[in-house]
Amino acid sequence: MSAVYLHIEGPVAEIRLDNPTKLNALNLAMIEQLDAHAAAIEADKSVRAVLLTATGKRAFCVGADIKEWAVLDGRSFARDWVRMGHRVFDRIARLPAPVIGVLHGHAFGGGLELAATCDMRVAGPKATFALPETGVGIVPGWSGTQRIATQLPSAVLKEMALTGARLSAERAYQLGFLNAVSEDPLGAAREIAERISGNAPQATETAKWMIAAALGEDRAANMEIIAGAALADSAEKAEGVAAFSEKRKPDFGKI
């Protein structure tokens, strides 16, 4: 039975965590489903914005299911859990369409790291954020010490990672981690998605890649993506491809 759903309606896709009895704690099957849904969104050029949501008011996601990772030895934990989570979370962060997180309740550990993959975030007023990993003998493993370091002041991130301190929605908003705090975060996120969907799609994608490159998020690939997109429709490329097909030297001087 699926615990992560994908629904696409017009230009907006919604990925929804649906494991409310465990406060949407992530298990291996859910991570694999997130990966599959991200792949489907990548392949669908009609998608202009993505909402990342969760079932239930108590928690967006309280992190990784401890029953799954606690039994793993060090090698399996590193290779099968940390590396896979990193790969899938990176894929979500790099989706061409902007991703908007809709955060009810707690976003702890891996749940906060998942929220950090979003380009924008809207939370309910009772949402709380934490990195409690050191309290159970591990460290953040899905970019809690890396990606979030570009989104929160270092002293705040250290306080969270080293002491388990929680951030309220209001403080997270003041620190710039949240775009808005709303009694209706899904409605507010949909409004953002609609505004994004009304803008030029290629320009929107390019702006996202440029900002990501500036922040160090997959910089090498993003620079080449931008350059490739700029040249793909150029007269120079057309002449180069034509010359190759016709087995002649390209004449770029005529362009």
Image (cartoon, rainbow, N blue to C red):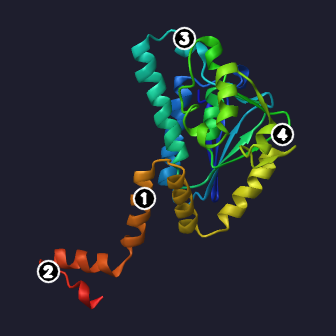
Question: Which of the marked residues, 3 or 4, is nearer the chain's N terminus?
Answer: 3
Circle 3 is placed at which residue position?
70
Looking at the image, residue 38 lies above or below residue 225: above
Using a 10 Å C-alpha cutoff, classify the residue at mark 2 as few (fewer than 14 neighbours), some (14 to 19) or many (20 or more). Answer: few
Among the 4 quarters of the image, the one containing residue 27: top right
Q: Give the mark nearer the N terminus: 1 vs 2.
A: 1
Which amino acid lies under the numbered mark 2 shown in the image of this protein? Lys
- According to the picture, the residue beneath numbered tag 1 turns out to be 223
- Tag 4 residue: 170
Q: Nearer the viewer, mark 1 or mark 2?
A: 1
Q: In this image, 34 relative to 78: left or right?
A: right
**Amino acid identity at mark 3:** Ala
Q: Earlier in the sequence, mark 2 or mark 3?
A: 3
Question: Which numbered disc flags the more N-terminal residue, 1 or 4?
Answer: 4
Does residue 158 appear left or right of residue 239 in this picture? right
Q: CA distance from mark 4 to mark 2?
A: 63 Å
Q: CA distance from mark 1 to mark 4?
A: 35 Å
Residue 117 at least partly seen? no
* Contact check, label 3 and label 4, Cβ < 8 Å: no
Amino acid residing under circle 1: Met
The answer to whether the residue labelled 2 contacts the one labelled 3, judged by CB atoms less than 8 Å apart, is no
Tag 1 near tag 3, CB within 8 Å: no
**Quadrant of the rendering where the N terminus is positioned:** top right
Looking at the image, which residue is at 24% across and 88% down?
253
Question: Mark 4 or mark 2: which comes first in sequence?
Answer: 4
Residue behind mark 2: 249
Q: Label 2 vs label 3: CA separation? A: 62 Å
Query: Picture quarter containing residue 12?
Result: bottom right
Considering depth in this image, is 218 or 86 the residue closer to the camera? 218
Residue at 56% from the left image edge and 57% from the top image edge? 211
Q: CA distance from mark 1 to mark 2?
A: 29 Å
